[in-house]
Image (spheres, rainbow, N blue to C red):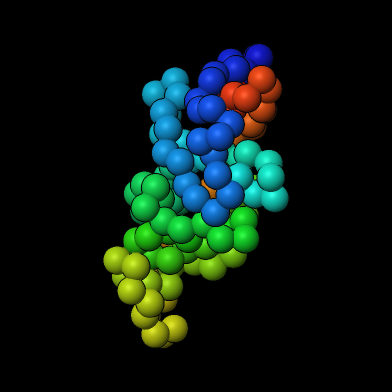
Amino acid sequence: MALDRIRVAAAVEVAEGSLLAVQAAGKKLLLSRVNGRAHAVIDRCPHMGMSMAKGTVEGGVVTCPWHNSRFDFCTGSNMDWASAFLGVSMPKWTHKAIAMGKAPAPLTVVPVEESDGQVYVRL
């Protein structure tokens, strides 16, 4: 089954070190640029399913604003799991409680293409 190519932003809107929230085919996505290349993930933290649009991205790592879970923005890999409550770091002994029994999981990465100054995803 071929994935549909959908325009989601002008290339200049996708900046290094920032997140751009967009929608495509009914899905909420986050876009960012890492080392000059545009990347996209489904805007849904796998911990509690909340939006990560108000999170931060630095050095290709996106941090969830709710529980500080950190992910590689290019691969979706989980790097740190549920270490905060509402963005406030908590002692290590509380991390399992914050995780609420959920095992670390990756973000869903979406294929991205750039051409003619536009960014496209394949869904």
Residue 12 occupies quadrant: top right
Q: Residue at x 41, y 28 (%)?
A: 23
Q: Nearer the viewer, residue 71 or 100?
A: 71
State the count of labels.
Answer: 0
Furthest residue in direction left, as rendered? 86
Q: Residue at x 42, y 32 (%)?
A: 22
- Look at the image and tell me whether residue 42 can be seen: no
Asked if 77 appears above or below 67 in the picture, the reply is above
Q: Position of residue 17 (x, y in %)?
A: 54, 54
Q: Position of residue 19 (x, y in %)?
A: 47, 47
Q: Position of residue 56 (x, y in %)?
A: 46, 58
Q: Residue at x 66, y 27 (%)?
A: 114
Seen in the image, is 55 located left or right of residue 35? left
Asked if 6 appears above or below 50 in the picture, the reply is above
Q: Position of residue 25 (x, y in %)?
A: 44, 20
Residue 122 occupies quadrant: top right
Seen in the image, is 45 located left or right of residue 107? left
Asked if 30 appears above or below 83 in the picture, the reply is above
Seen in the image, is 29 located left or right of residue 39? left
Image quarter of the C terminus: top right
- Look at the image and tell me whether residue 57 can be seen: yes
Q: Nearer the viewer, residue 117 or 110?
A: 117
